[in-house]
Image: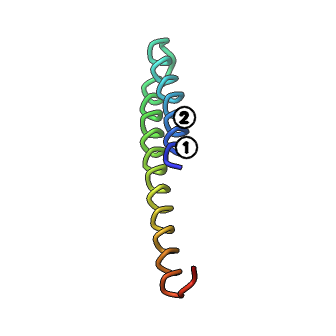
Amino acid sequence: MKRFFLGYALAFSAVWIGYGIYSAFAGFPHAAALLVFGFAFSAVLFLASWFSYWLMGYYKNADQLTEKILGKK
């Protein structure tokens, strides 16, 4: 699951950062803002991917502990 989350985050980040770099070289208006948005968007995506991976692991541990406490197998 981690590869899935990080793969999509990497793909979207490459698109946004790539477009920001392209716009900077092409001289588009507000190119710097677009590039900064691309980097910020990438950071948020990677943090969200990491957090969701961590949260799923936490839920898995909580389910195992619940099954152990309740005696279900």
Q: Residue at x 48, y 86 (%)?
A: 69
Q: Could you tell me residue 51's position as x and y percent?
A: 45, 56
At label 2, the amino acid type is Phe
39 vs 32: above or below: below
Residue most toward the front? 73
Q: CA distance from mark 1 to mark 2?
A: 12 Å
| Of labels 1 and 2, the one closer to you | 1
Q: Could you tell me residue 61's position as x and y percent?
A: 46, 70
28 vs 44: above or below: above
Which residue is nearer to you in this view: 26 or 11?
A: 11
For label 1, the SS is: helix
46 vs 17: above or below: below
Where on the picture, by quarter, is residue 15?
top right
Q: Could you tell me residue 9's position as x and y percent?
A: 51, 39
Q: Could you tell me residue 62's position as x and y percent?
A: 48, 74
Query: What is the number of the mark on residue 4?
Result: 1
Q: Alpha-carbon neighbours of circle 1 within 10 Å: few (<14), some, or many (≥20)?
A: few
Q: Quadrant of the C terminus?
A: bottom right
Query: What is the number of the mark on residue 15?
Result: none
**Residue for badge 2:** 12
4 vs 62: above or below: above
Q: Alpha-carbon neighbours of circle 2 within 10 Å: few (<14), some, or many (≥20)?
A: some
Q: How many marks?
A: 2
Which residue is nearer to you in this view: 42 or 65?
A: 65
Which residue is nearer to you in this view: 38 or 6?
A: 6
Q: Residue at x 46, y 38 (%)?
A: 42
Q: Residue at x 50, y 43 (%)?
A: 3
Q: Which is more N-terminal, label 2 or label 1?
A: 1
At label 1, the amino acid type is Phe
Which residue is nearer to you in this view: 48 or 65?
A: 65
For label 2, the SS is: helix
